[in-house]
Image (tube, grey):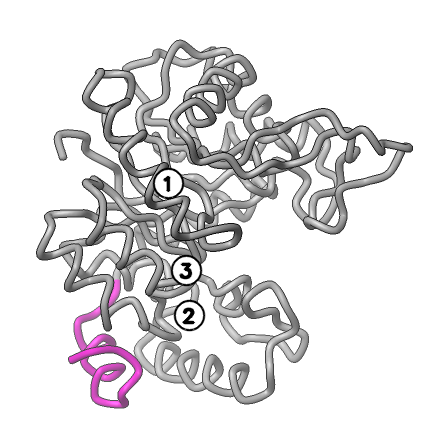
Amino acid sequence: MSLQLPRLGYGAAPLGNLYHQVSDERARASLDAAWDGGIRYFDTAPHYGLGLSERRIGAFLREKPRDEFVISTKVGRLLEPNPAFAGGRDLADQYDVPDDLVRRFDPSEAGIRRSVEESLERLGLDRVDILYLHDPDVYDLDRGLREGLPALAKLREEGLVAAVGVGVNDAAAAARAVREGDLDLVMIAGRYTLLEQPALDELFPACEDRGTHIVAAAVFNSGLLARPVPPDDATYNYEAAPASVIEKARELARVCTAHGVELPAAALQFALRDPLVASVVVGSANPDSVRQNIERMNAPIPDELWAALAADGFIPA
């Protein structure tokens, strides 16, 4: 892959009003904090707020020199008018936006080309650098890989994008996509983190065999590892974390603290220790949190911490 990604990228799902409404001013302040802190990779998707995330990201990046940033978006979900719209909100999909649009799975070449065109219109940009097939396992993995992967490869061959990949939460689905397609990248969410590494079973060997790189997302496991000490009401996989999972996270925190490191800093930097991982993507609609993530990504971490975590069986030796 010729495209070079920075160590830290900005995930723009929160800018689509994930869980709660975010003002335009706060969204802009978060993006300003990311840019001012040196972040130059931005990831979005039509799914995030039914296009709101793409519109906000595009409005921001249109003011920046195009050769100074990398942007990725996703395909596989088309946005179409909701014939049953009656003033409701998209809360069933966790976004606090009007549900005047609906998502329709379409991994066909025609659907993917249409998705790209509509994303570019929302972004107001002339191109994106990376396209991911988004969550094919949520709808129809067989069809998604059979139709979507060749279509993405064709767009890359035509020079319309620099790199293509898949974005999923399931490590086995990601491994299958790598084996069956010709992918540059896999964005895997929550399956290669300081807390757990199921992606090592199939995905990492497949990527090493095929020369595919990994973008690690959701490295805080939906917020569980985002604080120095995980609280009782921590979330994991977008739900309330079980007590056993919270206790494991607290054990991680105790090891980190004993070596003078905050748990979130170790969580951010862990994935990058493997050469297959090209970038870590985290998102926040809080500018202070964005700045804190940047600081933690650059915090010094002694080798002794990694050795201790490996000795305790938390991470591979």
- Sequence-wise first label, 1 or 3: 1
Q: For the C terminus, which image quadrant? A: bottom left
Q: In percent of the image, x 34 and y 63: which residue is there?
A: 171
Residue named by callout 1: 9
Residue named by callout 2: 263
- Sequence-wise first label, 2 or 3: 3
Mark 2 or 1: in front is 1
Mark 2 or 3: in front is 3
CA–CA distance in space, label 2 to label 3:
11 Å
Quarter of the rendering containing residue 231: bottom right
Q: In percent of the image, x 60 and y 87: which residue is there?
A: 243
For residue 162: magenta? no
For residue 306: magenta? yes
Q: Check disc 2 and report its element: helix, strand or loop.
A: helix
> Disc 2 vs disc 1: Cβ atoms closer than 8 Å?
no
Quarter of the rendering containing residue 176: bottom left
Residue named by callout 3: 219
Total numbered labels: 3
Q: In percent of the image, x 11 and y 50: which residue is there?
A: 210
In the image, 194 versus 181, the foreground residue is 181
For the record, the magenta segment spans 301-317
- Amino acid marked by disc 1: Gly
CA–CA distance in space, label 2 to label 1:
19 Å
In the image, 60 versus 160, the foreground residue is 160
Q: Position of residue 138 (x, y in %)?
A: 52, 54
Q: Is residue 21 left or right of residue 70?
A: right
- Amino acid marked by disc 2: Leu
- Vertically, is 84 above or below 235? above
Q: Is residue 209 left or right of residue 127?
A: left
- Amino acid marked by disc 3: Val
